[in-house]
Image (spheres, rainbow, N blue to C red):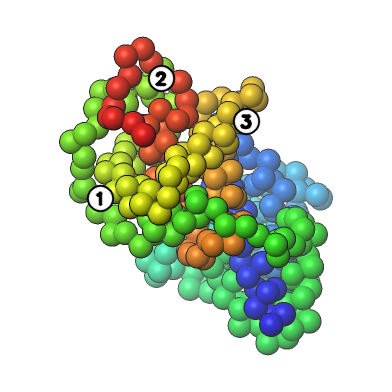
Amino acid sequence: MNRTNYFNYIEEKLNTLAYRIGSRSKLNLLELNIHSENFFACLCNIIYDLELENLNFSIQNIEGIDLIDYKNKILVQVSSTCTKTKIESSLSKKVFAKFKDYSYKFMSISKNASASLRNNNFKNPYNMNFNPQEDIWDIQLFLKKILAEENLEQQRDLYNFIKAELGQNVDPVKIESNLAKVINILAEETLDINVGSLEINPFAIEDKISFNDLEEVKDIIDDYTVYYHTLDKIYSEFDKEGKNKSFSVLQEIRRQYIELNRSDNTPTHIFYEIINSVMKVIVESSNYIQMPMEELQMCTDILVVDAFIRCKIFKNPEGYNHVITR
């Protein structure tokens, strides 16, 4: 059905964009945030039948406001941060005294807003027309609106717009990948945050983090190192299906690292781009079982951290020996 094809494409592209915005923001690479203001203005114009435009085109650097719809009297703050502090900081700007008859919307373009955030009471010194339940926008809300849209022509318009902005249609001819198979298995595991593995030498891993100047991603490595044993069991079962199964997964991650390591980017940037590249291979595999973006991101993070531990990506300091590697 065309409706299903349109929505699946839109959902994949919007969630991938949100992930990349969040990932790159951690590196202080904000060009996607800037370009996204125009993209999301056009997207909301189609979804909500608005006339939003980028206020920075006419008035530079107005704090608290990024988009404006003069006809429908709407102001929008676009942000990759989605917290009560961020919203209240925006609402506190003196510029809102000039727009007292306007409605205020807060648009999160990276993280989805929690139910607790929408149920909060917000300081609103200029008494802007702001209902958190309805006026905090995020990717999940947009997708719900698109999914519920009965007008097939509007869905087609959205599909064509996103296709033009975010890339061509997904190639219908896909091939299987062992990466996707491992991700599918890992996603079915119960990942206990208290799990541990006595086989890992944490001091050696600390040395490798320092040796490769990866302190900025240390928290991610620390969070997911504990799943080494879980993934090791998956690889052991996986190898029963044939020779080189797990080896091929680790070598594909290594191949992504080798290609990205040729650039002049920082080690931290390369680390995040390995995750992005591995995720792209997985999503474009015919045997990938679709899952929520947050789960896909977490499982991919676990795979990449595991490859880091197993000596497949980044250089090893002298004497590095964490476990018996594959």
Camera-nearest label, 1 or 3: 3
Residue at the spot of label 3: 259
User: Cβ–Cβ below 8 Å for labels 3 and 2?
Assistant: no
Q: Is residue 268 above or below residue 243?
A: above
Distance between the alpha carbons at the discs numbered 1 and 2: 27 Å
Which secondary structure, mark 3?
helix
Residue at image point 79% right, 73% down: 157
Q: Where is residue 66 in the image (x, y as percent from the top left)?
A: 68, 53
Residue at far left of view: 198
State how many labels appear: 3
Q: Position of residue 172 (x, y in %)?
A: 70, 65
Distance between the alpha carbons at the discs numbered 1 and 3: 32 Å
Which secondary structure, mark 2?
loop
Q: Quadrant of residue 201?
A: top left
Q: Quadrant of residue 129?
A: bottom right
Residue at the spot of label 2: 316
* Image-based side of 166 in relation to 23, left or right: right
Q: What residue type is labelled 3?
A: Glu
Instruction: Characterize the local packing of mark 3: few (<14), some (14-19) or many (20 or more) Cα atoms within 10 angstroms.
Output: few
Q: Can residue 222 be seen in this view?
A: yes
**Which mark is drawn over residue 275?**
none
Q: In this view, does 75 lie above or below 279?
A: below
User: Cβ–Cβ below 8 Å for labels 1 and 3?
Assistant: no
Q: Which amino acid does label 1 sit on?
A: Ile
Instruction: Characterize the local packing of mark 2: few (<14), some (14-19) or many (20 or more) Cα atoms within 10 angstroms.
Output: many
Task: Give the mark nearest the N terminus, 3 or 2.
Answer: 3
Q: Position of residue 241 (x, y in %)?
A: 40, 54
Residue at the spot of label 1: 193
| The C terminus lies in quadrant | top left
Task: Give the mark nearest the N terminus, 1 or 3.
Answer: 1
